Image (cartoon, rainbow, N blue to C red):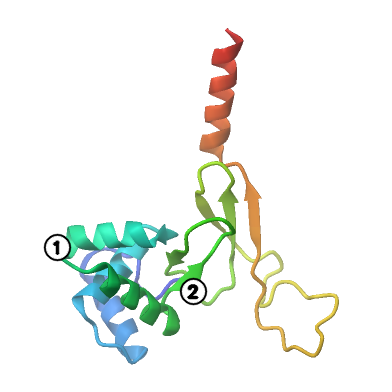
Amino acid sequence: MGRVDGVGASGASARAAAVAGLRAAGLRATAPRLAVLAVLGSLPHADTAQVIGAVREELGAVSSQAIYNVLAALVEAGLVRRIEPAGSAARYEVRVGDNHHHLVCRKCGAVADVDCAVGERPCLAPSEHHGYSVEEAEVTYWGVCPACRAAVASETSREAR
């Protein structure tokens, strides 16, 4: 499935797709919901503070609680995915339904999508399922992003001079 259809596209088509997605999920297409979907379409893996700031830039005065409520409703409806890398604030994305994984930079916290390691849900089979019906595997890869590696290399070369 990937993204919510049209979210992340541009202009009127993205808005129309977001309205259709909200209605299909049984939600009203309110300005805050549309704004949050637009923000997440352009800022994948945004945390709540980033979403609040961007929505306020677009709509003006919107309470933080309203944005928290919108995010919760969108997650519950399956239109947005909430990820919580260890030691990091919750992040949100509109890429849902494909069980992809994430790469997280240990230095700056940047997050990148990684397609499923094996292909189909749940991507990984546990050695023992203990009677559970496994539906999904959540994998987080940790490392250092290219920008942070370059910064460390630059700092090291400056110190060597």
Q: Position of residue 75 (x, y in %)?
A: 43, 78
Where is residue 122 drawn, in percent x and y?
A: 68, 77
Q: Residue at x 15, y 65 (%)?
A: 61
> Which numbered marker is on residue 96?
2
Looking at the image, residue 133 lies above or below residue 39: below
In the rendered image of this protein, does residue 152 appear above or below residue 156? below
The residue depicted at 33 percent of the width and 77 percent of the height is 69
Q: How many marks?
A: 2
Given the image, on which type of amino acid does mark 2 rest?
Val
Residue drawn at the location 41% of the way across and 59% of the way down = 47
Where does label 1 land, which residue? Answer: 60
Q: What residue lies at 39% left-to-right and 78% top-to-bottom? A: 72
Q: Secondary structure at mark 2?
A: loop
Horizontal and vertical percent position of residue 29 = 24, 83
- Residue 146 in the figure: left or right of residue 3: right
* Quarter in which the C terminus is drawn: top right
Amino acid marked by disc 1: Gly
Label 2 neighbourhood size at 10 Å, few (<14), some (14-19), many (20+)? Answer: some
- Position in image of residue 110 (x %, y %): 50, 49
The residues tagged by marks 1 and 2 sit, at their Cα atoms, a distance apart of 28 Å
Image side of residue 96 versus residue 119, left or right: left
Residue 14 in the figure: left or right of residue 86: left
- In this rendering, which labeled residue sits more in front, label 1 or label 2? 1
Q: Nearer the viewer, residue 30 or 98?
A: 30
Tell me, for residue 45, which label it has, or none: none
